[in-house]
Amino acid sequence: MFEGLIGQAIVTFARTLTGAHAWWRAPLDARGKRVYFANHNSHGDFVLLWSCLQAHERRRTRPVAGADYWNSNALKRFVGGRVFRAVLIDRVKREGQDPVGQMAAALNSGDSLILFPEGTRNQTDARLLPFKSGLFHLGEAVPDAELVPVWISNLNRVMPKGELIPLPLICSLQFGAPLTRIAGEDKATFLERARNALLDLDPDRNHDD
């Protein structure tokens, strides 16, 4: 109950601050498990995406996040573990570590995930950084999960790097159609196709990019 109240407060704050508008390009399976994969420019990306989901979908959707950040103090451990139910990944590679297995277990339990395939925040002038391989391996491990691209616009200007006070600016999220599976597709081809599917949702895209 307490966690739910905090979650609702976070949703209200995020939506009020950003005036977020979400557009859905295609219907999704109401009961299906899915991976929302998005561009990553701000610490607030997953919070805004999570807040734009319908309540029943939000309750079963978990962000994939760095364990070092969310385990750094008691408050973060509570919010990350109890409110967001984040799947925490150790970003320092260790023997026996299986991040894809962690994510696959969450999907196979009926949850959905929020994932940032760039692996880190994009602080360059490029629209997207190259994708890490995790999205490909996760799709291979759980082939019945829908892979849904989501483009987040303007949030990096709401929470610019180094600023403690967010700026009230309008943000938008474009939810695309799930990627169609192609039998035998290799990793490089899949990642390029997934990257292009995400770029195609950018309303401000430069066709000469």
Image (spheres, helix red, strand yellow):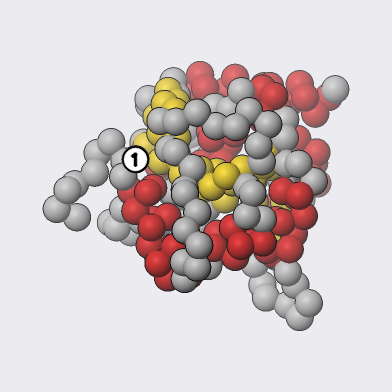
Q: How many numbered markers are drawn?
A: 1
13 or 178, which is in the foreground? 178
Query: Is residue 37 among the parts visible in the rendering?
Result: yes
Position above or below: 125 against 42: below
**SS type, badge 1:** loop
Query: Is residue 123 among the parts visible in the rendering?
Result: no
Image quadrant assignment for residue 57: top right
Amino acid bearing label 1: Leu
Position above or below: 135 against 32: below
Q: Position of residue 76 (x, y in %)?
A: 73, 45
Q: Position of residue 196 (x, y in %)?
A: 34, 53
Q: Residue at x 76, y 80 (%)?
A: 95
Q: Residue at x 75, y 72 (%)?
A: 97
Residue under label 1:
201
Horizontally, residue 160 falls left or right of residue 1, namely: left
Horizontally, residue 134 falls left or right of residue 75, namely: left
Q: Residue furthest left?
A: 208
34 or 162, which is in the foreground? 34
User: Can you say which quadrant of the picture contains the N terminus?
Assistant: top right
Q: Residue at x 77, y 55 (%)?
A: 105
Q: How busy is the neighbourhood of tag 1: few (under 14 within 10 Å), some, or many (20 plus)?
A: many
Horizontally, residue 109 falls left or right of residue 176, namely: right
Position above or below: 2 against 150: above
User: Can you say which quadrant of the picture contains the C terminus?
Assistant: bottom left
Q: Position of residue 23 (x, y in %)?
A: 42, 26
Image quadrant assignment for residue 69: bottom right
